[in-house]
């Protein structure tokens, strides 16, 4: 007879919960789905889903004339569209061997660094917002609005800008634009200092962000990290310094780096980068050269409207550009710029046709998102939200 006092050991299987974080959830800041395996509040495993807003940009680009691809780049990292636009223009310029005038390069630098500031304003304020610091978010966003007003004055658009052209800028800075830039340079430091004083040493903010979602330098490099997320882990790689473009070698600036690669370091690196971007804009604005704002490439640069109405040659060039009949040399080039989130690269193959034979966008957020499950594993659900915010993953860059 079985001894009732010696019962067999019963193994109780642990029960996990499956949680869908996204794809449409305010905490994800975009169209992301993460299927989380949860042990209470602890994330045991995570599987991200890539593809919710796939728009086939690379395939569309193979059927578009070169000048009509610029609006596609707007929709990648839409928080800093001008950097995408100008990165694409520089890629085509490298293919056709076009030398852009110095004034156009300086204007590009001003616009790109304003874009970087706008991008970092979004990221840093959202990190604050996700820890409950709404005041800093509402206060500092005023500066983002100032940046968009400058963009609107330069090109007529705010978010998806389509700014600049192959060969330079479509128009010079107006007096209103220069006045707005001067006002921004005067007002921005006070706003940034105030935002730092609200958040940077706040005990609640520090407790929530320090050691949250860390990644080592070795792991970040293994995944292919670049930009602020790599620099936060202690690696001082910046495309503007490693492979200078657009006259960045003319400007004096530092590369901020962190130590731990956690949410707090990612926040602090972006804060310091805003100071550096401010310094670059100031140098470029005060040292703005005189001269033309676009290269002598009539086959790529639309002529003045008055010339189109009155001169046959201008009408022919206008027709050829708009209809995409411009001849492009055969070749294979790669060009990268330092985007708001890291190295934004364009790998272009031309077979001499009216559209690219192949165009690949190297989107930094697509790379970051692959590391996300490893960064949030064994952490709290609330930390996963903060980690995503601090990586500044933009859904538009996930699928091209």
Image (cartoon, rainbow, N blue to C red):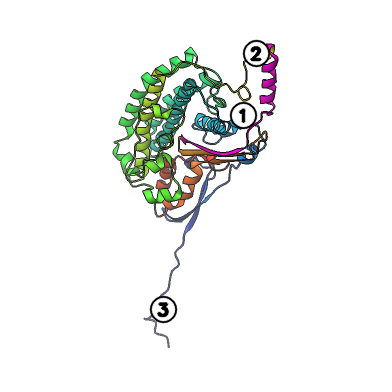
**Identity of the residue drawn at 40% across and 29% down:** 249
Residue 86, relative to residue 364: is it above or below?
A: above
Identify the residue under disc 2.
307
Within the image, what quadrant is residue 208 found in? top left
Q: Earlier in the sequence, mark 3 or mark 1?
A: 3
Q: Which residues are magenta?
A: 310-338
Q: Nearer the viewer, mark 3 or mark 2?
A: 2
Q: Quadrant of the N terminus?
A: bottom left
Residue at the bottom extreme, as displayed: 1
Within the image, what quadrant is residue 139 found in? top left
Residue closer to the observer: 292 or 75:
292
Q: Mark 1 to mark 2: distance in Å? A: 20 Å
Left or right of 56 on screen, residue 184: left
Q: Nearer the viewer, mark 3 or mark 1?
A: 1
Q: Secondary structure at mark 1?
A: helix
Within the image, what quadrant is residue 338 found in? top left
Answer yes or no: do the residues labelled 1 and 2 have beta carbons within 8 Å?
no
Q: Quadrant of the C terminus?
A: top right
Left or right of 263 on screen, residue 23: right
Q: Is residue 333 magenta?
A: yes
Instruction: Give how far across and how far down residue 318 sits, in percent.
Output: 67, 21
Q: Secondary structure at mark 2?
A: helix
Residue 10, relative to residue 336: is it above or below?
A: below
Identify the residue under disc 3.
8
Q: Secondary structure at mark 3?
A: loop
Answer yes or no: do the residues labelled 3 and 1 have beta carbons within 8 Å?
no
Residue 67: mark: 1
């Amino acid at each position: 007879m079985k001894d009732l006092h010696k019962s067999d050991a019963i193994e109780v299987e642990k029960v996990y919960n499956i949680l869908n974080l996204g794809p449409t959830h305010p905490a994800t800041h975009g169209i992301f789905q993460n299927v989380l395996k949860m042990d209470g509040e602890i994330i045991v495993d995570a599987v991200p889903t890539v593809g919710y807003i796939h728009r086939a940009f690379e395939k569309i680009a193979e059927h578009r004339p070169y000048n009509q691809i610029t609006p596609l780049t707007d929709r990648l990292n839409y928080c800093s569209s001008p950097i995408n636009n100008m990165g694409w223009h520089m890629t085509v310029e490298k293919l056709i061997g076009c030398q852009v005038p110095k004034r156009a390069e300086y204007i590009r630098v001003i616009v790109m660094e304003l874009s970087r500031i706008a991008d970092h304003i979004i990221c840093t304020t959202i990190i604050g917002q996700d820890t409950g610091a709404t005041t800093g978010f509402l206060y500092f966003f005023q500066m983002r609005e100032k940046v968009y007003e400058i963009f609107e004055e330069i090109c007529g658009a705010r978010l998806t800008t389509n700014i600049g052209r192959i060969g330079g800028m479509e128009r010079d800075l107006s007096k209103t634009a220069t006045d707005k830039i001067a006002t921004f340079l005067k007002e921005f430091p006070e706003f940034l200092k105030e935002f730092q004083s609200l958040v940077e040493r706040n005990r609640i903010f520090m407790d929530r962000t320090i050691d949250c979602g860390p990644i080592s330098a070795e792991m970040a490099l293994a995944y292919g990290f670049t930009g602020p997320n790599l620099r936060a882990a202690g690696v001082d790689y910046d495309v503007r310094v490693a492979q200078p473009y657009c006259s960045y070698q003319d400007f004096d600036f530092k590369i901020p780096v962190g130590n731990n690669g956690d949410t707090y370091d990612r926040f602090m690196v972006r804060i310091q980068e805003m100071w550096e971007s401010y310094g670059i804009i100031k140098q470029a604005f005060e040292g703005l050269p005189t001269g033309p704002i676009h290269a002598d490439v009539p086959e790529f640069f639309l002529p003045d409207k008055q010339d189109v109405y009155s001169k046959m040659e201008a009408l022919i060039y206008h027709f050829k550009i708009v209809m995409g009949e411009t001849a492009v040399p055969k070749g294979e080039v790669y060009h990268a710029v330092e985007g708001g989130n890291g190295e934004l690269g364009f790998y272009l193959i031309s077979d001499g046709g009216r559209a690219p034979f192949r165009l690949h966008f190297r989107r930094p957020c697509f790379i970051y998102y692959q590391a996300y499950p490893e960064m949030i594993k064994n952490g709290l659900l609330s930390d996963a939200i903060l980690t995503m915010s601090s990586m500044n993953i933009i859904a538009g860059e996930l699928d091209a």
